[in-house]
Amino acid sequence: MDEVDLAIRDGEFFTMLGPSGSGKTTCLRLIAGFEQPTAGHIEIFGERADGVPPYLRNVNTVFQSYALFPHMNVLDNVAFGLRVKGVSRVERLKAAEEALAMVELAGYGSRRAGELSGGQRQRVALARALINKPRVLLLDEPLGALDLKLREQMQEELRKLQRALGLTFVFVTHDQEEALSMADRVAVFAEGRIQQVGSAEDIYRRPASRFVADFVGSSNVIPADFAGVGAAGQWASLRPEDITLDPAGREAVVTGRYFHGRVVKLALDVGGQALTALVAPRDDLPDAGRATRIAWDPARVHLMERGS
Amino acid sequence: MSALSPAIFAPRSGPLSRAVDWVIRHPRMFVFLMVLPISLWLGIVYIGALIALLIQSFFSIDEYSGLIVHEFTLKTYAELFRSYNLDIIIRTVSMAAAVTLAAAVIAFPIAYFAARYARGKWKALFYIGVMLPLWSSYLVKVYAWKLVLAKEGILNWLFAKLHLTWALEAALALPVVGGNSLSVSYLGTFIVFVYIWLPYMIIPVQASLERVPAPLLEAAADLGATPAQSFRMVLFPLAMPGIVAGSIFTFSLTLGDYIIPQIIGSSRLFIGQAVYTQQGTAGNIPLAAAFTVVPIVIMGLYLWGARKMGAFDAL
């Protein structure tokens, strides 16, 4: 990781988005204290954190693998943070019961982690991380192992929980939809550097670089003069859903047609420039190999500041 | 276009191929054939011999004729409780316990390094380093240790060079465990036992530590556990099955060994030596058998106790 300059605000839901190996998890581990920076420094609520071991940071983590202790039952797992602080058994088990109730797992305390489903383990990990009342909660791809329906439900619950507790959440994911739907602000990582920081809408509507445009929402990254905004040598982002079929538009050849349910993805060739369009399913969509005509509103095209 | 290839190929010919195909179609037969040799070994050779031994221990010897009386009696077991024999048992069990404890303490950091940090050639080096002593003859190693520990040996010379002879002399002056030199004291027996059985402790502990996912220790630290607390509440309980497995080796191997205490140490007997002399020169097979039952009973009690204390909870 290289020259990452980041300020996360108190009480916000901050997402770090990027492909694997982009440095987002390393960034999270630096905040947790599992790794130490070789240069630069980290502050947590204004206090220098570099060189401070994880157990002296009031920051807790929900691990990707959940990392529940296999030799303890659920209740002892959740109560672990209080046990190491020397809280009495009666008190800490009571607090653990309450934490389990908060994640809707009341009554599961006597089970082993191995007896729970992925979604339930996820909730236990969440309860265990929250019992210490941390000032920052770090979440390392916590929903990665869940199926789609459960993931969407957990996304909503996490968001609600964050608002209710007023905590700072730092959420790492490689799923751009998840990042956009949950976060107050998003940082896009690539190759150990931050590409762009901004609100979800900012990132999506006004990507700063070709990488961001492509990674977030698979935009068409095209020469600016081709898109009809700006001069040659500049790059522009055109969202696939902003391309429409228009009998008065440019000539294009359909090179592929893929039915996705809610939308149909069309692979297009416009005078040698490949484009992707997302259109509503209709009966009269052109087949692969057929010619058609397309158009887009130049106002929807975003001219990018950086080429790379 | 050429003819289509068949969807199902013709059955294989030849009696062996057909027999294999039949077994593959019958998975229960396959499992049966696999466990057959080991069950025969365990059932007849191993358990059978043990039962024969157990029966022998309930016979007794006629003190005048020296012949075995084939009548069931507890007389032989009562003999174990004579102070001379009881001393042998206490001596052996104490040694086995001390060796096991020391082996566990020495093995743990080595196993932890191998499981957590050693990669590639360092891991290979670790395995070779741990296994290499097992490849050479046990007797050669024990005699080598006799030279190392002797009064004119390397260890004495080293202590002298380091001006630490006083420390060695203080250790040898200790009651019971001390002696004239390391090679004729319990201390020497202990050192050699620990050296010889150490690999049997390192390997299972390393295997158990390897199975502890790294995020578990990070999670413990993340939740506020100091390194000491992480060790006590997470790492140690999860390594416990490995430590118990290793201690079964070190404990029972020490209980049964009759060569090391014969070559290195005082001339007082250990269980293994007692068995050896009773079944050999003394011709008292029943007493030898009764002595052999002692380690079995002790190991049984040990495993039962370990289970009670939750040593296998992490399995």
Image: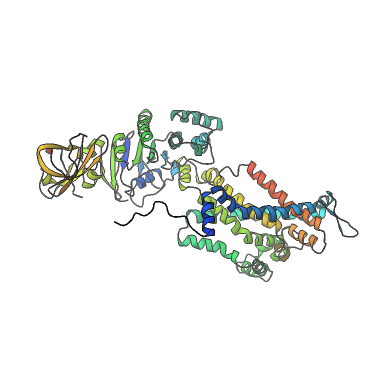
Residue B100 appearing in the image: no
Measuring from the top left, give residue A36's x and y in whole percent: 39, 49
List the single residue furthest toward the left: A248
Q: Is residue B295 left or right of residue B210?
A: right
List the single residue furthest toward the front: B3
Measuring from the top left, give residue A300's x and y in whole percent: 15, 37
Residue B273 appearing in the image: yes
The residue at the point 53 percent across, 31 percent down is: A93
Q: Is residue A286 left or right of residue B191?
A: left
Measuring from the top left, give residue B239's x and y in whole percent: 55, 48
Closest to the observer: A235 or A56? A235
Q: Is residue B193 above or below residue A84?
A: below
Residue B181 occupies which quadrant of the picture? bottom right
Q: How many marks?
A: 0
Measuring from the top left, give residue B47's x and y in whole percent: 70, 52
Closest to the observer: B181 or B307? B307
Q: How is the image coloured?
A: rainbow
List the single residue furthest toward the right: B64
